[in-house]
Image (cartoon, helix red, strand yellow):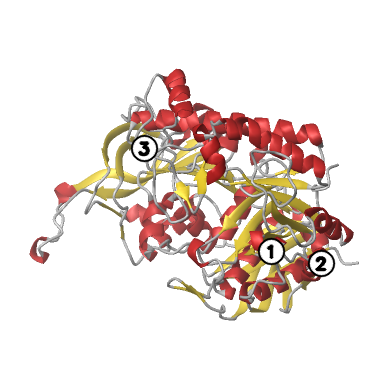
Amino acid sequence: MSWWTNYPWRMVQTNLREIDMETMDAKAYAKSLKDFGATVVLLNAAGIIASYETKLPFQTKSSYLHGDSLQKVIDACHAQGIKVIARTDFSKVRYPLYEQHPDWAVRTKDGDIINYNGDVHVCPNSDYQQKYMLEILKEVLTEFPFDGVFCNMSGFLVMDYSGKYYGPCHCENCRKKFKEMFGLDIPDKDDFHDPAYLKYLAFKNICTKKHKEDIIRTVRSISPEIAINGVDYIRTESNTEIGRSQWVYSASMNSRLTAGPSGDRPSDNACVDFIGFRYRDISVSPYQVSLRQWQNLANAGSVSLYIMGDLSNHKDVSAINASKPMFAFHKEHEELFTGSKSLAKTLLVRNMPPAYPDPEYEGWIRFLTESHIPFDEIKAAELKDAAQMEGKKVLILGENKMLSPDLARLADAFARQGGTVIANGLTGILGKDGRPLPQPMLACMGISKITGISPKSMSTMFMQTEKDKAVFTRSAETPYLAPGALVVKCQAVQGAETYLSMVDEHPFGPPERCYYTDKDITGQPGVIVNPYGEGKGIYLPFNPGTMYKDEGYTNTFTYMQDVLFNLAGEEDLLPGTTPMVETTIRKTQKGILVQLVNTSGFFGNTYYAPLPIQNVCVKVPADYLKAAGLENAAPAVDALKCGRTTVTENNGDLVITLDTLKDYEAIAIAEKE
């Protein structure tokens, strides 16, 4: 068993600047980590700058190696019981190296290089990354007893630190390889509407996959006990940047995606201390850091902090101090978090690569989180077989425009065997040419025919009919649903139930003409519920997630709650509680851990201290208790942070009332001793 398996992962990433090695005190560095509660540290080792006496001519050695050596730092950390991961960065080389090897550089479509403060971007298809970086990895991982390795900024970079966009690499290596593979020239810019760009995406994936395989093979040849990022553990970031909107569920999303439904690999979602690239010395709100750490803990069982410099010389200590309680809490209860498994019955599929914004997906995260429905997340490319959906009752595909035949078959089989599949928008509807397929790929959706697609609807809406009122109970006061820009006009298969009726485009100005007539009511469904085998499919011919993420109206939220609760059979585990509380439920070695995260401090784009919430009702359904082996006894219930609980039983369900929720609470449920 490798060291990272069921390891109590508490990471501090210290991005050491060149000058930090000038006065490095190895023992003080390691002690500060130990006192903080860290069990893993990530520190600079090789690549752009070597933090040691490298013997390789294609790596620039730091000129500040006058303090304790890298070897002493690693030894001091190991003496404190701290694992050490080497941070490497092969995305750039110093300008003098570029001058010796101009063929290594990324080239714009005009043939220019990207020179940022004397660091020149290098191409993943250059000899530097294909050959020489592997030699550097061999040197640093052979010379020093690192426990793991992390390669920063891997892949094809199209922007610099100032946010300037350069477009795809047009170096000779890339142009030649792309032409050989696809017979095309590299597109000038990233454009999903360009067929050549879709080929270029495939090209990048092929190159990146092979490069990753070369790295894995190189590291494994040195030692199988060196943890590799992206394989043995996965590092992500919750960060901010000037000019970018805040995403309050960043840490929850990253942790769930990393852990996956099985939760069998360390999830290292780094809470980034600084507010953006240009302000590396200034921390984000301490309440934002606190929220992200609790979200990490609730969704993957780890905490992680990323700072510039080290704990002893980082002058803005607000984020450091904000993280201390989470590191201490994890340390005190690490046996509960280590090896815990999600009990969520819902699986949300991410269709876009994590690097790309996906408002539809983020909107679904909001629907589920704010409805207190525990769920897991998985990337579409990683969902390969039915075993990954074991214990799940609901599979949410959202909008997957490029639904693969394999995933369509898997989803249909899930519904046929008793599950509920929810899809919306253009999922499985379009072919590679962008036109509607003769038959949608997903049979369980219950669509017999696509009669039209309106990507820029303005006033189209859906209205409740008399029979809909029994289902859309939360939407009783708002009989119309605003779907947003995309509307798919379709017909349902025979035997499917349809809900809501489309009101087609009609005047919305001037006020005297703002009304629809009977001829505008099309009868096109707003929801299709199709019995399929032992289960069913639910199809929404619009994109509710995008509408909610972008606009945030309760009109969207209440309708989606009716879909989730009344049509999909989901359960609210915090009935009567504000949507500003996240909840997760996990199986531990001793029973169940319910975690609550208070997000009420997020207002506008600022994070404040969350408001205390009184008398939070937590319902643990009987089947959750059964899954944890707690169905036959009155279990012990303990709030681990600061709250107090009272417990009752209702038809086999456990009903817990928490007196006060401050920022976070963990409720342990176990057999009485």
Mark 3 neighbour density, 10 Å: few (under 14) some (14–19) many (20 or more): few
Q: In screen coordinates, is 557 left or right of 396?
A: left
For mark 1, give the secondary structure. helix
Q: Is residue 590 visible?
A: no
Q: In screen coordinates, is 222 left or right of 579?
A: right
User: Depth check: 84 or 100 in front?
Assistant: 100
Relative vertical location of residue 202 with respect to residue 357 in this rendering, above or below: above
Relative vertical location of residue 438 with respect to residue 295 in this rendering, above or below: above
Q: Position of residue 94 (x, y in %)?
A: 56, 46
Q: Nearer the viewer, mark 3 or mark 1?
A: 1
Extreme-right residue of the structure: 673
User: If the image is split into quadrants, where does the N terminus sit?
Assistant: top right
Circle 1: residue type: Asp
Q: On the image, numbered disc 1 is attached to which residue?
A: 20
Circle 3: residue type: Phe
Q: CA distance from mark 3 to mark 1?
A: 43 Å
Ranked by sequence position, the earlier of labels 2 and 1 is: 1
Relative vertical location of residue 485 with respect to residue 419 in this rendering, above or below: below
Relative vertical location of residue 475 with respect to residue 227 in this rendering, above or below: below
Mark 2 neighbour density, 10 Å: few (under 14) some (14–19) many (20 or more): some
For mark 2, give the secondary structure. helix
Q: CA distance from mark 2 to mark 1?
A: 19 Å
Ranked by sequence position, the earlier of labels 2 and 3 is: 2
Q: On the image, numbered disc 3 is attached to which residue?
A: 192
- Name the quadrant containing residue 82: bottom right
Q: Residue 34, which numbered label?
A: 2
Ranked by sequence position, the earlier of labels 3 and 1 is: 1
